[in-house]
């Protein structure tokens, strides 16, 4: 495989040749249920759990029992403070 610096601008790289797959999500006419084809990101052999309320996939039930979670890390410093410090550094 060539390194990125040897490729001309706009050249399709080896990574880009395999596009990301969008999971199929079919909603039931009632709007209360859905089915999907996304596999669990932790084990890869069970279906993930689709959180319809927030539109994200979480690990399957077995992986949940083994402690796998999808987490959004809490920031120690609020974003507004980081922005203010960054703006102060530029000025
Ligand atoms: Zn799993």
Image: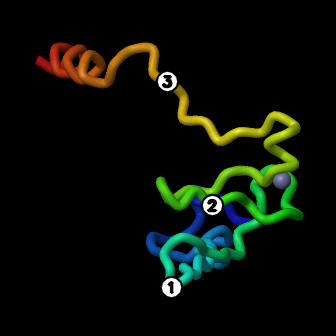
The residue where tag 3 is placed is 74
Tally the numbered discs. Answer: 3
Q: How is the image coloured?
A: rainbow
Residue 29's label in the rendered image is: 1
Q: Quadrant of the N terminus?
A: bottom right
Q: Residues within 10 Å of mark 1 (few under 14, many from 20)?
A: few
Split into 4 quadrants, where in the image is the C terminus? top left
Pick the residue in front: 3 or 38. 38
Label 2 within 8 A of ligand 1 by Cβ: no
Say which mark, if any, is on residue 50. 2
Label 2 Cα neighbours within 10 Å, binned few <14 / some 14-19 / many ≥20: some
At 50% from the left and 85% from the top, the residue drawn is 29
Which residue is located at x 63 percent, y 57 percent? 57
Q: Is residue 84 above or below residue 27?
A: above
Distance from the alpha carbon under mark 3 to that under mark 1:
37 Å
- Quadrant in which residue 41 is drawn: bottom right
């Amino acid at each position: 495989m060539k390194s990125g610096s040897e490729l001309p601008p706009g050249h399709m790289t080896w990574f880009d040749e395999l596009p990301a797959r969008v999971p199929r999500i079919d909603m039931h006419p009632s709007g209360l249920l859905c089915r999907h084809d996304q596999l669990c990101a932790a084990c890869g052999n069970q279906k993930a759990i689709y959180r319809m309320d927030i539109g994200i996939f979480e690990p399957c039930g077995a992986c949940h029992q083994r402690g796998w979670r999808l987490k959004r890390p809490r920031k120690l410093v609020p974003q507004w403070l980081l922005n203010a410090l960054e703006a102060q550094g530029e000025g």
